Amino acid sequence: MRCSTRRAFKISVAMIFLWLFITLRIPEEIQDVQKVVVRYGSKKNPKSLEDWPVITYKYLEKIHQRKKTWLTVGITSVSRQGQGGLLDTLAALYHASSAAEQKRMTVLVHLADSDSTWLRKTVLRISSLYSSQILTGQLLLIHAPSDAYPTVNSAQDELSQAQMYSKQNVDHAFLMSFATKLSTYFLLIEDDVFCAPNFVTHIHSKVINRKPHTWVLLEFSNMGFLGKLFHSRDLPLLARFLLLFHKERPLDWLILHFRTLLAQQNPILCRPFLFYHRLSHFTFENKTLTGQEKGPHGPDVLPGVAFTDMRLTGVYSPQEAYTLDESFFWTYNVRTRNSLTVILSHPANLNRVQVRTGSIMDGKYILEKGQVELGYQPEGTPPNCTSFTLLGRLVQGQMDQIIPKSTGDQVSCVKLAANANQASGLMIRHIYLWRAGDAEDRKADQN
């Protein structure tokens, strides 16, 4: 009983901390954003705990007076060494949305890092790129003071697993609590993702089609907590739930358990999935490695550029098919002999090519009839190979083939070509290349 009372007290304190947000109000001038962050977010100019509810309530009141939108897209972001995933994700969100869709959407970003330098740089960069969205209230940035988090005594790289769970869960509890009154629905994504074109319209269609059936959670991705859609009315309860068990389990596990507690026993996966991770990233339960970390026989990084004569959607680049991360190239209405070609910066001796098309989960959007060709002797600007030889045809949209030495020497191009018209969508997940090594390496790859 004493433990239960103590826990209840801690949760009550945590709920009080939900008021301790620093919000970046819709500014009359963009310079106001910097002033708000420096004044209320800097350790050099701290405010007493008595001041926080007053300061925060003033900004909450102004923001909640704005017109309620249909969807809030929630993102929590922290600084990552050498990565600008948040800016890329914001660009993807707006590029994938029409003007009409943007009016139905609010983007809420929780800058959940205590590094004041990163905070200042990030806010200034976002405010310079998205001033119109900030001024109209379509983009909101928030930051919670470090006082609101559980005390951590050790260095960040020495955090226990429970402490890392705690940070992530509390970050998102703040995010969800703030989002409660912004819109009818709340979509949770991460800060390193690609978005399918017109994802707002697709989500709206799925929600309409679910009526009159009830639901708690719709999933537009099968990766962790990415692409999870909630009713905004459930967010206060979910935020309390995350705070109650913030050290017990990772966020994705708690979200799924919350779903079952609200009587939705089975997941509702909405395909095709609309969100994919842009970069290989680290999660507590599911560690994803870059190609270089997959082992001694992983694909090689050979400098090159991808070109295509397939339709471009404006969001997906053909280069995304030639990377070691989880990005992909998406197109539709493919015609016979349309192709995507990787042109290497320097000829290479190859001993293996792997091509993957279609969705990982359900196998849709494969290249139904296609083949892979190897090219040689590039000419022109941009360069293109003057001769090609057939390596093989795809089987159910896939290929993983060892290249004979006579064919794999001095390769400059790898072409994926369509052998028939295909009106449906096409997802080219990756084209992986392996450089030929000595005889032992070649034998190991064959095995």
Image (cartoon, rainbow, N blue to C red):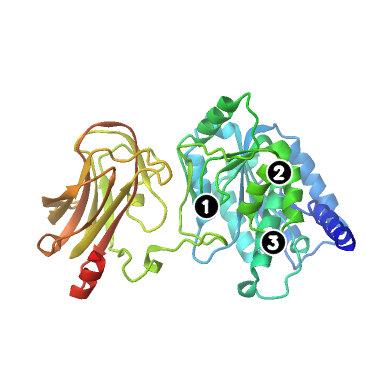
State left or right for residue 221 relative to residue 256: left
In primary-sequence order, the first of circles 1 and 2 is 1
The three-letter code of the residue at mark 2 reads: Leu
**Residue 431 position within the rendered picture, expressed as x and y whole percent measured from the top left:** 29, 53
Q: Residues within 10 Å of mark 3 (few under 14, many from 20)?
A: many
Q: Which mark is residue 261?
A: 2
**Residue at the spot 55% in from the left edge and 60% down from the top edge:** 283
Query: Which quadrant does the N terminus fall into?
Result: bottom right
Q: Nearer the viewer, mark 1 or mark 2?
A: 2
140 above or below 156? above
Give how far apart the Cα atoms at labels 1 and 2 are. 35 Å
Determine which residue is flagged by label 1: 87
**Residue 28 position within the rendered picture, expressed as x and y whole percent measured from the top left:** 69, 43
Determine which residue is flagged by label 3: 166
**Residue 169 position within the rendered picture, expressed as x and y whole percent measured from the top left:** 68, 56
**Residue at the spot 65% in from the left edge and 71% down from the top edge:** 160
**Residue 174 position within the rendered picture, expressed as x and y whole percent measured from the top left:** 72, 51
Q: Nearer the viewer, mark 1 or mark 3?
A: 3
